[in-house]
Every structure is written in C-alpha cells, then in structure tokens.
Image (cartoon, rainbow, N blue to C red):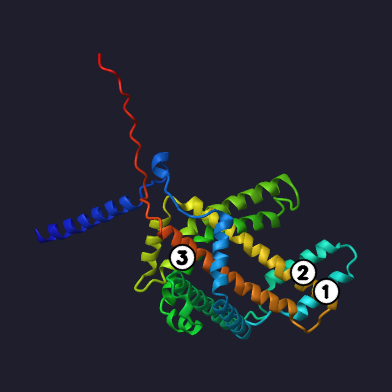
Amino acid sequence: MAVGRFFRNIWRKIIARGRDFLSRRPHRSLYLTPPSKSRRSLRIRKYFAFAGEVWNLIWKNKRLFIKFILLYSLLSAIIVGLMSQANFAALRDSLNESTNLGFFNKFLTLFSNAMSSGSATTDAGQQVLAGLLFLYGWLALIWLLRHIVAGEGAKLKLRDGIYSSGSPVLATFAILVVILVQLLPFALVLLAYASVTSVGWINTGIQIENMAAWCAVAVAAVMTLYWICSSFIALIIVTLPGMYPFRALRAAGDLVIGRRLKLVLRLLFMVLPIALMWLVGLVPAILIDGWLSLTWQPLVPIVVLILTTLTILWCAAYIYLLYRKIVDDPAPPVGRDKKPKKSKKGKK
C-alpha cells in the first residue's frame, strides 16, 4: 500500500504539471489553433515610434551611458585589444594599387573587413576574458535600465550598476549556452551550404540553384529567430533576484506565447538602427583614413570599438523596453471564443 501510494503521488504530480502546462501553453504543434484563440494582444507603439522611445531613454540618461561607453571601450581595448591597423592599412594599399576594382568595390571590401576583423588577438584566455567582460557589461546595463524605468535614474551612478549587477552571471551564462544550442540548426544549414558549394553542386553567383539555396538559408534564419526570441526575453528575466535560468526560460515562453511573430518582426527591426549607426560612424572614418593614408594611427579600430559598445547598449535598451511592454500587457495566452449571436425571431 505504501509503494502504491508513492507511485500514485508521483502520477498525480505529473498530471498536475501537465494541466498547468496546458493552461499556460494552449497552442499545440501540428494542430490548427482557431483565429479567435490565437490572437494575443501586445500594446506597443509602432516600429519607428518605439525606436524613438528607446533613443529618448538613452538620450535622457546620456551622461550615465557615456561613462559606460568609455569604461567598457577602455576595458575592451586593454583586455581584448583593437583591430590591427597595420593589416587594415596593408589591405587599403593593396586595393588602391589594384586597377580592376572600382571605388565602390574597394570601399565595400574595406567596410566589410573593418566590421568582421575584430580584435588583433586570438588567445584563448583573452577570449574568455572578453566573454566575461560582455556578461558583466550586459548585466550592468540591464541593472541600470531597470532602475531608470523605475524612476530612479536621477540618483544612479555607474559604480552602483557595476558593483550590484554581477550576481546572476552564472544564470545569464546558462541562458547564453541555451541560445548557442538553439543556433545549432542554423549553423548546420550554413555548413551544408558551404559543403555543397565547395564540391561544385551549387555554382556561386547569380544562379537559380544559388538563389534557391539562399532562400533556404533565409528561411532557416527566420525560423531560428522565431525559436530563440523567448530566450532573448529570458536574458532580461534571469537578472531578477532569486531567478533560476530554466525558470526564466519557462516564464519567457509563457510571455511570448501567441506573440512570437510580433517579437520576431520587432527584433528584425532592431537591426535597422544598428546598420544606420555603423554606416554613419564607419563610412567617414574609412574615407578619412584613406584620404590621410594613416599607417599607425588607429582611427578605424577606435571607431569600430566605440560602435561595438554602442551596439551592445542599443540592443540592451531595445530588448529591455520590449520586455517591459510585454509584461505591462497581461493578456491571457488564449482568446475567448466569440459566441454566435442568436437571431431574434418574432413569435407567432
């Protein structure tokens, strides 16, 4: 009887957890959810208006965030290092000597090289330190943003965020590991594309099979973003006091259920201001570097470092305000069925 009671209790807990999951996640895979139930509201401003709201938040606290940008850039330059100015100058000179390339192709090559080069070091220890620096920078930004939105921005100091935000570093690292696992299918698609291109099954250039392959890669990228959008929200939830990583993932999944497509579109739009920022900041730096023919003066590496820090700041502010909009809209995960109106017929 005791053994039977033990297994019955386990079964009751399983049933209770299943019912709780069904109440939180009403949508089922391979089953069509009625449109009346699949619509979940998200009270948020339009794309450009929301981006303006994020910018206004950063601008109102510009002194605090300028201090963060300077400190993070300095630590990144010391720990990680700058992009090699000698390699960039050698590439610039070789492109200038080439007569087959036009001005636009030369400039595009320099621009892509500046964005993808990164630091000059590849040491494993420094890469670990760079990851820790990113984690602590992200946590400090989220801590500052949480207190700014709560109305405490006037008395905030950067040192408060640095000293008080490091406790959930392991939980945040666990969420980042989950995101890396979720990116594996997209990485496998890219690996398959590189493999079939290297053996000649797909011709490079504007060919019908190459276009079809890139369409498949784009679909895989969108589906991966659709999958990991809740993990981005979990990066904010996990910074709450006493929050565990998998509990944060579960809470984030409950928040985004029925809203994933809207969040995917918002996250894709987040890239547009970043691209404009890199164009406005990096294009003049490359033109000045080519005009002056700089050799050892690291103008482009410094601009790349500052733009990288600004990108981290923008992403943190954008995702945090998006998380606040989701939390402030307590809509249930399932809409109610609309009952058909009964027609009133006159009595005979």
Which residue appears farthest toward the bottom when viewing the image? Answer: 78
In-front residue for pair 42/225: 42
Mark toward the start of the polypeptide (2 vs 3): 2
Q: Amino acid at mark 2?
A: Leu
Q: Does 82 sit left or right of 257 as displayed?
A: right
Which residue appears farthest toward the top when viewing the image? Answer: 348
Q: Amino acid at mark 1?
A: Gly
Q: SS class of the residue under badge 2?
A: helix
* Residue highlighted by disc 1: 290
The circle on residue 110 is: 2
- Confirm whether residue 326 shows in the render: yes
The circle on residue 202 is: none
Of labels 1 and 3, the one closer to you: 1
In the rendering, at what x and y percent does residue 176 appear? 48, 69
- Confirm whether residue 188 shows in the render: no
Q: SS class of the residue under badge 1?
A: helix
Which residue appears farthest toward the left when viewing the image? Answer: 1
Mark toward the start of the polypeptide (1 vs 2): 2
* Residue highlighted by disc 3: 178
Residue located at (45% from left, 84% from top) = 163
Q: Amino acid at mark 3?
A: Val
Label 2–label 3 contact, CB within 8 A: no
Characterize the local packing of mark 1: few (<14), some (14-19) or many (20 or more) Cα atoms within 10 angstroms: some
* Quarter of the rendering containing residue 305: bottom right
Residue located at (45% from left, 59% from top) = 325
Q: CA distance from mark 1 to mark 2?
A: 10 Å
In the rendering, at what x and y percent does residue 265 appear? 55, 53
Q: Is residue 166 above or below residue 333?
A: below
Q: SS class of the residue under badge 3?
A: helix
Q: CA distance from mark 1 to mark 3?
A: 42 Å
